[in-house]
Amino acid sequence: MADKLHFSLVSPERELMSAETDQVDIPGVEGWIGVLPNHAPMMTTLAPGMVRVVTGGEEKRIFVRGGFAEISPAGLTVLAEEAMPAEELDADAIAQRIKDAEEDVADADTDDKKLAAQQSLDRLKDLQAAL
Amino acid sequence: MPSLKDLKTRISSVKSTQKITKAKQMVAAAKLRRAEERATEARPYTERMEAVLANLSASAKGDANAPRLLAGTGKDETHLLIVATADKGLCGGFNSSIVRLAREEIVRLQGEGKKVKLICVGRKGYDQLKRLYEELVVWRTNFLEVRQIGFAQAQEIAEQVLSRFDDEEFDVATLFYGKFKNVVSQVPTPQQIIPAVAPEGIEPPDLKGAVYDYEPDEQEILRALLPRYVAVQVFRALLENVASEQAASMTAMDNATRNAGEMIESLTLQYNRARQAQITKELIEIISGAEAL
């Protein structure tokens, strides 16, 4: 039996998921990160996107909107601001978030903020195209 | 000496008060259980966040580029006090004790010649503070319309605080709330949230010689993390406040119910005595009337 990766997904209000998995793909701000068991420790901020959890050949997709991921020897922890299973996500929900993100881009007063907002907007648009 | 009828009305009025306090006590007990559950459910996020932050801030300390949320503005001229209380009364000294603590702090800071600004969360706190410090209140909110306090509410407050910090309206922010120790004891507590105080006593995870990789880099992550940490701390305070309020309310209502019980007892005794006296008086009248014949 190969090693398992302990994955836990927590939102501010409660722990959404805690499981032993084979692989988890997370949407880092600088690109996708595939996390396997015994991954080197790292910390990253997340862009809006799908977290893909693979357990024994089965795949589960969860939408997260921003947050953090921490990989330590104890496993992978995703601190998500908002998370919901992919099945519950529909075009309307995405459209709403795109609208919010567009407003963020318009409101951003510094280049840094604008860039960050634009990045999350792009991610959301990718997601919408994929749906 | 009140008449028999007066006593009867008073007894029935105390009885109905007792029914209300008893019902309120049971409602508070149910709500307390739910509030405690929610506080427990929120714990993993807070704990993980603290662990990450402890890790990051240890390496950022002393760094000249450290984010202002962590390093502060370098002054402590203006203090922002965020006073979180309940929206409703009937919970003993819960609201007053938080307000008292905040007021002592205001007096102390003003005595030192510092400027004070207030944010009031919850209606009761504002009601009590506005008499003396109306002009210090820069923003206020309450949750009368909110059925269950969620992270969204905490975020709204955090945004207010952070945007004021960005505009350099204050240097230090302290949050006042009722810490939930247990059902009988809730401690009004001040907690400094800006500049952020890194949580202490958290062991960094054993990396077996490896070092953390940061993406983008440490500073960026810290910059993104700190505003969230403010929201998380506010959220936790709000949840604890709800639990404390319900616990205080439960105790207060329990006392009221018991008090009403004692009152009913003494009134009933008085009523019976009065009735007895009246009967005796009537008997004497009849007997003396009969003897006179």
Image (tube, coloured by chain):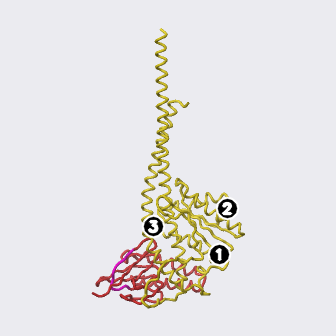
Chain colours: A red, B yellow
Which of the two discs, 3 and 2, sits closer to the camera? 3
Left or right of B201: which side holds B77? right
> Label 1 vs label 2: CA separation?
19 Å
Disc 1: which residue: B171
- Badge number at residue B133: 2
Please, is residue B10 above or below residue B210 in the view? above
Tag 3: Cα neighbours inside 10 Å, few (<14), some, or many (≥20)? many
Q: Is disc 3 in the same subunit as disc 2?
A: yes
The vertical placement of B48 against B8, above or below, is: below
Please indicate, yes or no, whether residue A124 appears anywhere in the rendered image: no
Crowd tier of the residue under label 1, counting other residues whose Cα lies within 10 Å: few below 14, some 14–19, many 20 or above: many
Tell me the kind of residue under disc 3. Answer: Ala
- Magenta-colored segment: predominant secondary structure: strand
Q: Mark 3 lies on which chain?
A: B
Q: Are marks 3 and 1 in contact (CB under 8 Å)?
A: no
Q: In this view, does B214 lie above or below B269?
A: below
* Residue type beneath disc 1: Asp
Q: What element carries label 1?
A: loop
Residue A18 in magenta stretch? yes
Is B279 displayed left or right of A52 in the figure? right
Residue occupying the point 60% across, 84% down: A110
Work out which quarter of the rendered image holds the N terminus of chain B and state it.
top right
The label on residue A99 is none
Span shown in magenta = A16-24
The residue tagged 3 is B39
Question: From where the camera sits, is residue B100 visible?
Answer: yes
What amino acid type is highlighted by mark number 2? Tyr
Q: Mark 2 lies on which chain?
A: B
CB-based contact (under 8 Å), mark 1 and mark 2? no
Q: Return the disc, 1 or 2, that comes first in the chain's sequence.
A: 2
Q: Position of residue A29 (x, y in %)?
A: 48, 86
